[in-house]
Amino acid sequence: MRQIALEKVTLNIGTGEPGEKLDKAVRLLQMISGAKPVQTVTQKRIPTWKIRPGLAIGCKVTLRRQPADALLRRLLKAVNNTLKPTSFDDAGNVSFGIPEYLEIPGAEYDAQIGIIGLEVAVTLQRPGFRIKRRALKRRKVPRRHQISQEDAITFMQAQYGLTVGGSA
C-alpha cells in the first residue's frame, strides 16, 4: 500500500486570449501527446485584461497509464532529467515548464505553430487514494499515507533517473 505510482501527466498552455494563438496551442498539444486537447475557459471577468466568463484562453491534455509514462520520459529529456527541488510540492506533485517545444525529443518544428512553451504537471498517487474522490463515504487521505516531497523525489529518481538540484 506504500508503493507510489504515476497517476497522470497534464500538459497545459495558457494563451491569454482566443483566436490564432489558441489554435496553435491546441495543434501543438495534439502533436506532442497524440490526444485531443480541451480548451480551458475563464470563470471571472477581468476588464483590464479583456477577459469575460466563458472565453477560451488556454488548452490542456491529460494522459494516464502507459501513454503518460512514455510522454513523461520524453518531457524529462527536454529538461536534461534535472529539476529543481522547488518543482516538487508537499503533496507529491511535480511541475515544470519547457520554454520551447523543440527541446522535446521527437518534436519537429512546424512553421504554422511557431515556437511555444508549455507547462507539465505530474500527479503521483498511492493505492487507497481513491477515498478522496469516491462518491460515497468520501474521506481525507491520512497524513501518514500522503506522499511527501522526499517520497516524490525518491520515486522520480528511481523510476525516471531524475537529478534533483541545479538548474532546470
Image (spheres, helix red, strand yellow):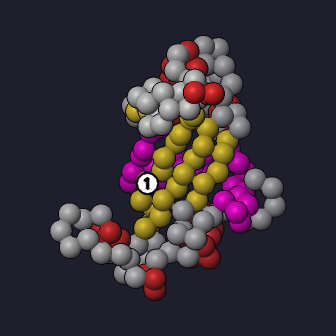
Q: Residue furthest left?
A: 136
Q: Residue furthest right?
A: 166
- Badge 1 crowding class, 10 Å Cα cut-off, few under 14, some 14 to 19, many 20 or more, is some
The residue lying toward the viewer, choosing from 92 and 7, is 92
Residue 95 % position (x, y)? 60, 54
The residue lying toward the viewer, choosing from 158 and 96, is 96
User: Residue at coordinates 67% horizontally, 41% vertically from top-left?
Assistant: 98
Residue 13 lies within the magenta run: no
Residue type at tag 1: Lys
User: Residue at coordinates 54% horizontally, 62% vertically from top-left?
Assistant: 93
Residue 68 lies within the magenta run: yes
Horizontally, residue 140 falls left or right of residue 111, namely: left
* Residue 116 in the image: above or below residue 133: above
SS majority, magenta: helix
User: Residue at coordinates 60% horizontally, 13% vertically from top-left?
Assistant: 112
**Which SS class for mark 1?**
strand
Residue 47 % position (x, y)? 57, 27
Residue 51 % position (x, y)? 53, 27
* Residue 86 in the image: above or below residue 149: above
State which quarter of the image contains the N terminus.
bottom left
Q: Is residue 96 visible?
A: yes
User: Residue at coordinates 64% horizontally, 51% vertically from top-left?
Assistant: 96
Horizontally, residue 97 falls left or right of residue 51, namely: right
Query: Magenta part of the protein: which range?
Result: 60-87
The residue lying toward the viewer, choosing from 70 and 84, is 84
Q: Residue furthest front?
A: 47
The residue lying toward the viewer, choosing from 142 and 97, is 142
Residue 145 % position (x, y)? 43, 81
User: For residue 74, what is the image quadrant?
Assistant: top right
User: For residue 135, what is the image quadrant?
Assistant: bottom left
Q: Which residue is mark 1?
A: 8
